[in-house]
Image (cartoon, rainbow, N blue to C red):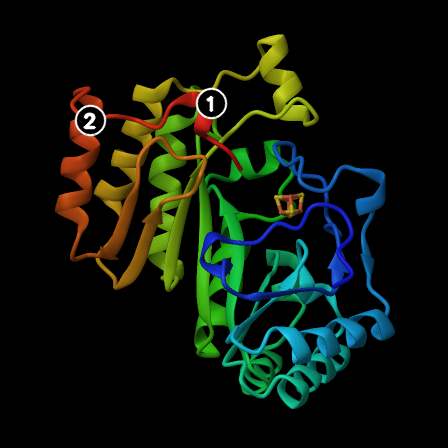
Amino acid sequence: MHYQGNIIRPPSEANAIILQVTVGCSHNRCTFCGAYRAPEQQFQIKDDQIIAEDIAFAAQYCRRQKTVFLADGDALIIPQQRLLALCQQIRTKLPWVRRISLYANCRDILKRSAQEFTELKKAGVGRIYMGLESGHDPILKAIRKGTTADEMITAGRRVREAGIFLSVTCLLGIGGRKFSQQHAEDTAAVLSKMRPSQIAVLTLMLLENTELGKAAAEGSFQLPDRVGLFEELRALLAVLEDFRCQFQANHASNYFTLNGRLPRDRDAFLATIDQALAGEMSLKPEGLRGL
Ligand code: SF4
């Protein structure tokens, strides 16, 4: 397979065929994100010939993998007809594949109509991962996410209405100590309106090669301490409206794991967080956290 730069995929795509169809992220401006800063990860849509060679490789060597993940950061930027042709190629050459998944940013989702998402669903796109990070507009602006909370809700609903599984990530700590409470409340409010199929909670890790990492080093951004992060997670869960979805805080960046369904497991999740707040459970050592 032709892989360029670091390949990042969601935890639930661990067993997927990773087909790199774009390199990097077309936005690449979020202040906390250091994923695609290297020169060799400058954004591009990969050449059709290279993608075709990778599909041919997968046809020969990946016959046991039933899903395909289209990397990197926002494969949905590929124009509709080209993306549909790519899905068709996957279906023809890898007929055992049951689902195609990809990362998409809010802006690229909003450029597509409901009809276009229906076409993608029919072509095999079964899951879309979108980074919300926060539902609080001042935070979205500060981190240069490039969209507002209302736009995130519209984008999320559009994906869901096409019958596509929508996984949305939120980032504990992204509002700093200053906006921690508003971050929790507004993120819960946006999720309640969007009603994604899955909520994935990550914990902010400050990276030296990012603006936010530099701001933290200079003292202009203060990450909540562990207790503050756990209280933030508790506040988010406590005010989230009842709707059925998977809830996962099982990313490598998290200090402990929550993994289950809402609303069924809400009380158990809150009890686990209370245990963490009371210092009654072992937490992941700092050195073992990762992205
Ligand atoms: S967080 Fe997502 S949208 Fe923002 S720069 Fe990183 S990959 Fe791109």
- Residue type beneath disc 2: Met
Name which of mark 2 and mark 1 comes first in the sequence: 2
Q: Is residue 285 above or below residue 39?
A: above
Q: What's the residue at 52%, 59% (across, down)? A: 129
Residue 1, by quadrant, is bottom right
For the view shown, which residue lies furthest in the front direction? 61
Q: Residue 40 location, x and y as percent?
A: 84, 44
Q: Is mark 1 within 8 Å of ligand 1?
A: no
Q: Secondary structure at mark 2?
A: loop
Instruction: Tell which quarter ligand 1 is in.
Output: top right
Direction from residue 93 to residue 254 in the image, left or right: left
184 shown above or below 110: above
Q: Position of residue 150 (x, y in %)?
A: 50, 53
Establish if 185 lies above or below 77.
Answer: above
Q: Are marks 2 and 1 in contact (CB under 8 Å)?
A: no
Left or right of residue 289: residue 62? right
Label 2, label 1: how far apart the Cα atoms are: 18 Å
Badge 2 crowding class, 10 Å Cα cut-off, few under 14, some 14 to 19, many 20 or more, is: few
In this view, the residue in front, 137 or 262, is: 262
Asked whether, in this view, residue 281 is left or right of residue 155, the answer is: left
Which percent across, then down, holds residue 236? 30, 40
Which residue in the protein does label 2 denote? 281
Residue shown at the point (80%, 74%) measured from the top left: 53
Mark 1 = which residue? 287
Q: Hey, what amino acid is under mark 1?
A: Gly
